[in-house]
């Protein structure tokens, strides 16, 4: 029983990371109706930037904030320079662009930093916090960081005029233009925010999975499973889905062995697509014929 | 002669290779209401879309003397042109209140915005009662009122109205047109109204243009158009 509680709690901690990446996926999905396959690689690249800064002697939280801001700017630039010109192309062309971005980021990271696995520091102490035996302090700390990020993002979308405008642009671009919203820039901001959230997720997961160009591959799959489970068009649902997948992955790993973990994510993806394509909390789309 | 707010000369518009407007001229006076009448497919909706840069056009569109042709839609809107589009353009997943808030998105005078909420709730009390409700759950008439309110939250100089009577019960239509008159007189908002319901539009407007397959075939004061023999027979039906 103790072991189960332990696994559930640390599942919640990694689930938070999946949840934030799932949120990043949903944000871009809502605006473009496409999954950004490069989301994980952008996060990985940002994490390398943080690593470089830390190596250069920048204190951890300094490097953290510089990385988040750079990822935001990078996301905006990618949307403006690469995605925007192909915005109105057929879906398949866009998917190829996203996959292209994935490959480019992956190989450029490998080219600059090599494929050797590197340790990435955790900002939290080695000893468990508050003398608890269930969670390592990194698990607890990263859970707190993700929670703060999620709350900030929700607060932004819920209470600020800019957040409202971004939701409007994603929902109804034509009407948004008619109330003066600069729809193109809202999309770019969405990419920036998604990249920044991804950067946080990358830095929080890197101490666990270690830093290497392929580190986000599995994570993105879990995040995608979480997003699908909660409903790919529902941010709150996707976040919850991320947490569920985190716990599920850990508990299944405990009973059936950790080799099967990634399979869980794939099973979730397929099960959702077959049984309930809109996810637990997603809107069911009815098409009139 | 009063000042002209919107002046359109030789306006052509096309979707792809299909030409819809063939060089039309019309004006909206400062503080005036102009209506464009015509049957389905005459180019009424396209005319409104052309004014706010939503279709490819040639010709001249002047807002208070400044060219607005080729200006992106959102920048035309920022110059005070609000458009109640065909189909109402409601943000269905937003609450009623959020629909109004997004309408005021470009405004900097936040204190005034707060007053405008109350003024609009005065015009449409049922919106106040439903402010927390999802806009998608409103009835057609309520959504039309919400669309008008959203446009008013922009505090426009010029209000473009695309068939506001479409699909609404006669009683609600009358109420809506009364409110248009009030808004026009009290706030001095000029209007360009596109309608199929000619008798209704001619009662509200001061100038009217009759559009047939992309060309203006009659133009004049609302009074003179109402008394025009041909118009009466084909559009007013008596």
Image (cartoon, coloured by chain):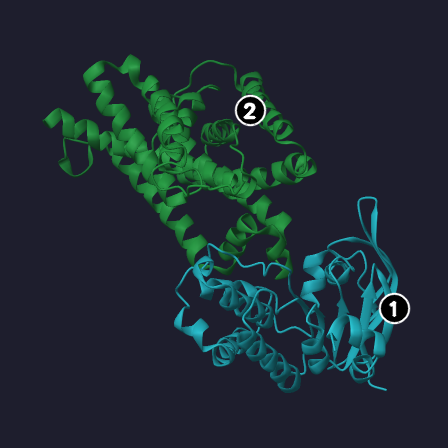
For the point 78% across and 60% down, which residue is it? B42
A20, above or below A208, in the image: below
Residue toward you, A109 or A231: A231
Regarding residue B10, the answer to whether it shows in the image is no
- Asked whether, in this view, residue A266 is left or right of residue B122, the answer is left
For the point 76% across and 80% down, which residue is it? B30
- Asked whether, in this view, residue A261 is left or right of residue B150, the answer is left
Q: Are marks 1 and 2 on the same chain?
A: no
Q: Which residue is mark 1?
A: B217
For the point 65% across and 31% down, which residue is it? A90
Cα distance between the residues tagged 1 and 2? 58 Å
Colour of chain A in the image = green
Q: Which residue is mark 2?
A: A102
Which secondary structure lies at badge 1? Answer: strand
Write down the chain letter for disc 2.
Answer: A
Colour of chain B in the image = cyan
Residue toward you, A144 or A7: A7
Q: Where on the picture, by quarter, is residue A124?
A: top left
Residue toward you, A243 or B139: B139
């Amino acid at each position: 029983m103790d072991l189960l509680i332990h696994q559930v709690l640390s599942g919640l901690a990694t689930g938070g990371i999946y949840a934030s990446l799932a949120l990043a996926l949903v944000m871009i999905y809502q605006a473009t109706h496409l999954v950004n396959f490069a989301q994980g690689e952008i996060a990985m690249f940002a994490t390398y930037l943080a690593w470089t800064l830390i190596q250069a002697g920048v204190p951890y939280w300094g490097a953290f904030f510089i990385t988040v801001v750079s990822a935001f700017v990078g996301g905006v630039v990618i949307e403006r320079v690469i995605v925007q010109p192909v915005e109105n192309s057929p879906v398949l062309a866009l998917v190829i662009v996203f996959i292209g971005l994935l490959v480019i980021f992956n190989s450029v990271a490998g080219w600059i930093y090599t494929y050797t696995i590197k340790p990435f520091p955790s900002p939290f102490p080695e000893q468990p916090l508050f003398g608890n035996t269930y969670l390592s302090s990194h698990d607890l700390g990263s859970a707190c960081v993700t929670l703060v990020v999620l709350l900030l993002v929700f607060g932004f979308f819920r209470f600020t005029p800019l957040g409202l405008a971004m939701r409007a642009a994603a929902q109804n671009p034509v009407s948004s233009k008619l109330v003066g919203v600069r729809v193109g820039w809202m999309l770019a901001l969405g990419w920036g925010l998604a990249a920044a959230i991804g950067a946080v997720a990358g830095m929080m997961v890197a101490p666990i999975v270690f830093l290497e160009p392929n580190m986000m591959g599995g994570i993105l799959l879990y995040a995608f499973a979480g997003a699908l489970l909660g409903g790919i068009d529902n941010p709150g649902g996707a976040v919850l889905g991320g947490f569920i997948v985190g716990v599920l992955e850990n508990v299944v790993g405990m009973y059936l062995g950790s080799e099967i973990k990634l399979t869980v994510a794939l099973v979730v993806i397929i099960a959702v697509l077959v049984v309930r394509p809109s996810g637990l909390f997603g809107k069911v789309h009815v098409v009139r014929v | 002669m009063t000042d002209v707010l919107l002046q359109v000369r030789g306006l052509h518009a096309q979707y792809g290779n299909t030409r819809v407007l063939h060089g039309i001229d019309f004006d909206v006076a400062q503080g005036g209401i102009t209506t464009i009448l015509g049957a389905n497919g005459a180019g009424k909706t396209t005319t409104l879309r052309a004014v706010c840069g939503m279709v490819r056009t040639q010709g001249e569109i002047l807002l208070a003397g400044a060219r607005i042709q080729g200006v992106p839609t959102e920048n035309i809107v920022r110059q005070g042109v609000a458009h109640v589009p065909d189909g109402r353009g409601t943000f269905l997943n937003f609450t009623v209140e959020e629909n109004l808030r997004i309408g005021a998105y470009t405004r900097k005078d936040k204190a005034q915005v707060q007053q405008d909420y109350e003024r609009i709730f005065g015009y449409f009390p049922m919106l106040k009662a439903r402010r927390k409700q999802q806009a998608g759950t409103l009835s057609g008439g309520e959504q039309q009122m919400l669309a008008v309110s959203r446009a008013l939250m922009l505090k426009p100089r010029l209000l473009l109205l695309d068939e506001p009577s479409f699909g609404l019960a006669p009683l609600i239509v009358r109420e809506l047109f009364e409110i248009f008159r009030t808004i026009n007189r009290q706030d001095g908002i000029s209007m360009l109204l596109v309608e199929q319901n000619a008798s209704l539009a001619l009662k509200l407007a001061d100038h009217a243009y009759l559009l047939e397959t992309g060309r203006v075939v009659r133009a004049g004061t609302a009074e003179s158009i109402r008394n025009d023999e041909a118009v009466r027979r084909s559009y007013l039906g008596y």
